[in-house]
């Protein structure tokens, strides 16, 4: 049988889809592109915004059209939040929630016998165990691999539906993470990205086993990975300032293999809005983390998320977010319009911002973020950084890869060099950053 997959949303969803692909292959399925004829279509959904719900519905209908006789199985956060709504979409055969994905093949086999639509969704109170889906080693990217380390969140930011969709914090045992890391390194991967719903909450649940003398939180994972032999690097997909502080971040700076880049989700630059968001830190505490990183290295890469148009956001509050971009000098800003989500406190708040205002503010945040990015790139002009060479871009006639501080670098290849390029891919090289170019910088190899 042939199976095709489509993934919406975050890196965790992408990781889980890779795990499903591995399980399907092991059971004899042929994995094909989502646009191809398949017997089974799996859509891994997202529900972080209303737009994510809409895109999920569109893909469900689109994939059924490729083969009307196919089995359409829908999983992910949208299913967990609105199982009846998803099940009612024409053509859906299976709706499978969080912590049930590992049983998807079993449910498909049941459907083939009974030919009756099924829903398998656990209640929020039942999402207590980490869903182990086995080591994920078959990823499309041949240089960078993701390792999921935890599931769930208990922060309940007032705008966010994810704690309801993913459940409480469940952390993966360190031994399982190390096993997967060693398998990935043996296959030649040179960058391991630690990901989760809220990686900073790793090990925060009651009863989680921690070795005597081991560090707290995600640091215990980084500490063990940092000890592994070989030339590779570790990157955190994100770190919540709602959980960590400047002192904690300072400790992370001691790990040799940890990239000099952190994604710190600010969400707002206004103390008043941060409080309304139920973010347990203020503007100054955020800036204290930034100062600790930049005191260590002025070119330390910091990226962030910001929400435009949260309920009650005044022009002054919005200007605070713009000023935060200016003060921090982010390497990249992801700006989002506030999306009213069911079950969240913010959905019932007064002062909902009109859509045109949210759209305009989001655009201004993106523009300010782009200006900050350009300043950060200029700051790196002439610097020498280690780059992991990942692919050859034909259109630009250049090798590309990322620095440890998360700058995309383009290294022009001379005519006739094609035979040499394969030998450079998935290698670390010291590169001088020459000038801003496209979404990153042009670079040149150092000649020793």
Image (cartoon, rainbow, N blue to C red):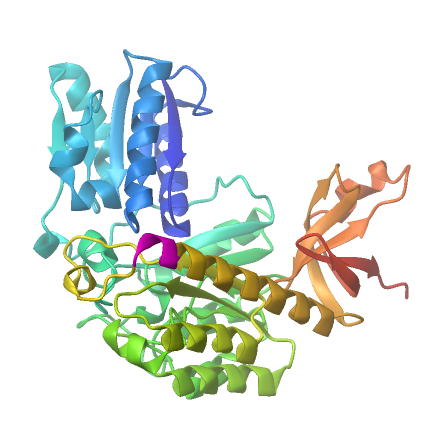
| Residue 128 location, quadrant | bottom left
Q: Quadrant of the C terminus?
A: bottom right
| Residue 264 location, quadrant | bottom left
Q: Is residue 34 above or below residue 188?
A: above
Q: Which residues are magenta?
A: 354-358
Residue 325 image point, x, y percent:
52, 73
Res 120 seen here = no
Res 282 seen here = yes
Observer-nearest of 424 and 410:
410
Identify the residue at horizontal 40%, vertical 83% (top origin). Answer: 283
Asked if residue 446 lies in the magenta stretch, the reply is no
Q: Is residue 371 above or below residue 292?
A: above
Residue 163 image point, x, y percent:
21, 59
Residue 427 image point, x, y percent:
71, 53
Q: Is residue 200 left or right of residue 146?
A: left
Q: Quadrant of the N terminus?
A: top left
Observer-nearest of 274 and 349:
349
Identify the residue at horizontal 43%, vertical 78% (top origin). Answer: 320
Q: Is residue 437 above or below residue 433?
A: above
Residue 52 image point, x, y percent:
32, 43
Identify the residue at horizontal 18%, vertical 59% (top origin). Answer: 347
Majority SS type along the magenta span: helix
Identify the residue at horizontal 84%, vertical 37% (top origin). Answer: 419
């Amino acid at each position: 049988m042939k199976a095709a997959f489509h993934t919406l949303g975050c890196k965790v969803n992408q990781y889980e889809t890779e795990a499903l692909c591995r399980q399907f292959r092991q059971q004899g399925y042929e994995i094909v592109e989502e646009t191809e004829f398949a017997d089974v279509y799996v859509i891994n959904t997202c529900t972080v915004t209303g737009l994510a719900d809409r895109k999920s519905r569109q893909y469900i209908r689109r994939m059924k059209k490729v083969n009307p006789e196919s089995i359409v199985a829908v999983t992910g956060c949208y299913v967990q939040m609105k199982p009846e709504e998803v099940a009612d979409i024409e053509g859906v055969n299976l709706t499978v929630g969080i912590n049930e994905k590992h049983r998807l093949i079993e449910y498909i086999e049941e459907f083939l016998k009974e030919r009756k639509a099924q829903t398998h969704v656990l209640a929020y109170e039942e999402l207590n165990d980490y869903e182990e889906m086995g080591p994920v080693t078959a990823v499309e990217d041949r240089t960078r691999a993701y390792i999921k380390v935890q599931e769930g969140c208990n922060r309940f930011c007032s705008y966010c539906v994810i704690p309801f969709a993913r459940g409480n914090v469940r952390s993966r045992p360190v031994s399982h993470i190390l096993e997967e890391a060693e398998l990935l390194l043996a296959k030649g991967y040179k960058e391991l990205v630690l990901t989760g719903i809220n990686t900073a909450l790793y090990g925060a649940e009651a009863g989680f086993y921690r070795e005597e003398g081991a560090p707290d939180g995600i640091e215990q994972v980084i500490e063990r990975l940092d000890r592994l032999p070989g030339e590779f690097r570790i990157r955190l997909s994100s770190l919540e300032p709602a959980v960590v502080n400047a002192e904690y971040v300072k400790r992370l700076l001691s790990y040799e293999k940890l990239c000099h880049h952190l994604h710190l989700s600010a969400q707002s630059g206004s103390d008043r809005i941060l409080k309304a968001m139920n973010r347990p830190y203020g503007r100054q505490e955020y800036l204290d983390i930034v100062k600790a990183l930049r005191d260590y290295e002025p070119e330390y890469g910091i990226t962030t998320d910001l929400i435009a148009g949260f309920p009650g956001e005044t022009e002054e509050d919005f200007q605070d977010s713009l000023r935060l971009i200016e003060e921090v000098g982010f390497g990249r800003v992801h700006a989002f319009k506030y999306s009213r989500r069911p079950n969240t406190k913010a959905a019932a708040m007064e002062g909902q911002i009109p859509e045109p205002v949210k759209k305009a503010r989001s655009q201004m945040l993106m523009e300010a973020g782009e200006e900050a990015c350009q300043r950060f790139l200029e700051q790196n002009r002439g610097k020498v950084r280690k780059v992991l060479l990942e692919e050859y871009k034909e259109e630009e006639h250049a090798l590309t890869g990322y620095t440890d501080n998360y700058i995309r670098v383009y290294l022009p290849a001379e005519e006739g060099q094609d035979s040499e390029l394969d030998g450079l891919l998935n290698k670390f090289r010291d590169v001088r950053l020459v000038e801003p170019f496209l979404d990153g910088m042009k670079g040149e190899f150092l000649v020793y």
